[in-house]
Image (cartoon, rainbow, N blue to C red):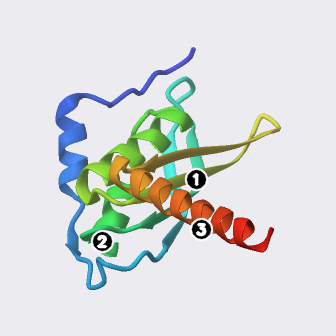
Amino acid sequence: MIRTRMSNNNNQQENKIDLLEVFDNGYPDRDYLIKHTALEFTSVCPKTGQPDFGRIIIEYIPDKKCIELKSLKLYLQSFRNDGIFYENVTNRILDDLVEKLSPRTMTIIAKFTTRGGIFSTIRADYESPEYAELQDMYLDEYFDDENESERRIS
C-alpha cells in the first residue's frame, strides 16, 4: 500500500517562512556571492512515505538583506516530516528565500541521494528584474565601448 504524506497547506507554508530571519547587508553597494551548503537535508517521499536525504546549496548575491544562518537551519529542518517532491521543495525554498531577502540573484541546487538507482539534482534560479536590467545596461556599455575602440583602430 502506498502512503501519501502531503503537508503543504497554506498554514504550514506561512509558518515555515516565518522561521526565516534576516539582517541588514553591510555592503549593499557591492556585488558579492554568498554560498551556504546544508549537508543533511531531509524530507519525505510523498508517494512511499520513505525518507529522502539530500544536500541543499544556496547561492545568492544579496541586495539589502542577508539570511541569518540559525534561522535557515531551522527552516530547512522544518521539511523533515513533509511529504514533498524534490522539484517542489527546491522551488519552495527558492520562493521563500526570495520573498524574505529580495536578493539580486539566487540559485538553489538540491542534490538528493540515490533512490532506485537514480541520483537527482534540481536547480532553480532567480534574478531580480532590476538587476537583470542593470546587467544588460553594463553589457551594452561594454560592447559599445569595445566597438568604439575597434572603429578607432581601423
Q: Is residue 110 above or below residue 101?
A: above
Q: Nearer the viewer, mark 1 or mark 3?
A: 3
Residue 145 image label: 3
| Circle 1: element type | strand
> Which sits in the foreground, 47 or 27?
27
Residue plotted at (49% across, 43% down): 90
Q: Position of residue 57 (x, y in %)?
A: 55, 61
Residue plotted at (52% across, 63% down): 141
Whichever of labels 1 and 3 marks the residue nearer the N terminus, that label is: 1
Crowding at dot 2, Cα within 10 Å, few <14 / some 14-19 / many 20+, comes out as: many
Q: Position of residue 53 (x, y in %)?
A: 59, 51
- Give the residue type at disc 2: Cys
Q: Badge 2 is on which residue? A: 66
Q: Does residue 81 appear in this view? A: no
Q: Badge 1 is on which residue? A: 109
Q: Does residue 90 appear in this view? A: yes
Q: CA distance from mark 1 to mark 3?
A: 36 Å
Q: CA distance from mark 1 to mark 2?
A: 18 Å
Q: Quadrant of the N terminus?
A: top right
Which residue is at the far bottom?
26
- Give the residue type at disc 1: Ile
Which residue is at the far top?
1
- Give the residue type at disc 3: Asp
| Circle 3: element type | helix
> Which sits in the foreground, 27 or 131?
131
